[in-house]
Amino acid sequence: DQQVKQNSPSLSVQEGRISILNCDYTNSMFDYFLWYKKYPAEGPTFLISISSIKDKNEDGRFTVFLNKSAKHLSLHIVPSQPGDSAVYFCAASGSGTYKYIFGTGTRLKVLA
Amino acid sequence: DTGVSQDPRHKITKRGQNVTFRCDPISEHNRLYWYRQTLGQGPEFLTYFQNEAQLEKSRLLSDRFSAERPKGSFSTLEIQRTEQGDSAMYLCACPTSGGVDTQYFGPGTRLTVL
């Protein structure tokens, strides 16, 4: 049972354009969400997070949007840069548990 | 630098052997997580420590797996009688001190079981 889903395994975007990565979840108890970036042979690197009391959080070129009614979040990267090429994971956590549930990842390729 | 180191970075072993991995947070983190990541998947939660207490454990962690955090600082993950299905990247993560707002991951230990 995949509680956190990233339905697009890959995405290609031109440099300078917007990258939109999507994530859906099924557990309504989730109340905290994170996005990570991962390069090959490295551990995931934290990017940005959002609590369920918000619907948007922005940090530089990265913005995360949360739609609780749709159980959907998205990560926007504007403008996209070639260095953003990596695998992006969303993760979710809920009250009553310490663990984070990760999606399967989306591989982003930013074309120069 | 996330402040979390893991050793070894790579481990190749034969099926049936025991292996042990170590995770060292540089500064004192009272919370510590272990995850496993296989190809094409996201990290899967294995276990969670608060100080030396193991507070949560995944059903993925069979009897062959054991984790410890004896003094609430470094942690070890041992796999006994390894199987080929244990081949994966084993990741250690520590939240920022004082909360669970973010998790900083170590570089991981890649295990290959032949």
Image (cartoon, coloured by chain):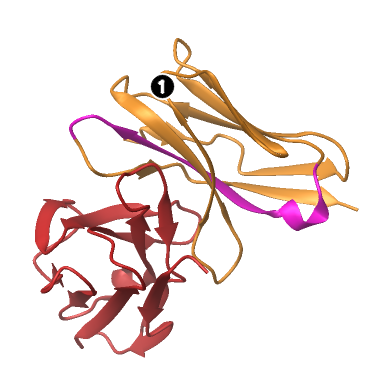
The residue most toward the top is A69
Does residue A105 appear left or right of residue A60 in this picture? left
**Residue underneath mark 1:** A52
Q: Nearer the viewer, residue B104 or A111?
A: B104
Residue B43 rendering spot, x and y as whole percentages = 40, 54
The residue carrying pointer 1 sits among few (fewer than 14), some (14 to 19) or many (20 or more) residues within 10 Å by Cα, namely some
Q: Is residue B38 above or below residue A80?
A: below
Which chain did the image draw in orange?
A
Is residue B96 in sight in this rendering? yes
Whole-percent x, y for residue A92 in the image? 38, 36
Relative to B19, say whether A36 is above or below. Answer: above
Q: Is residue A89 above or below residue A75?
A: below
Q: Could you say which quadrant of the image residue B18 lies in?
A: bottom left
Chain identifier, colour red: B
From the viewer's perspective, tell me whether residue B16 is left or right of residue A20.
left
| Residue B1 placement (x, y as % from top left) | 52, 69
Q: Which residues are magenta?
A: A80-96
Q: Quadrant of residue B93?
A: bottom left
- The residue closer to the viewer here, A88 or A66, is A66
Q: Nearer the viewer, residue A15 or B99?
A: B99
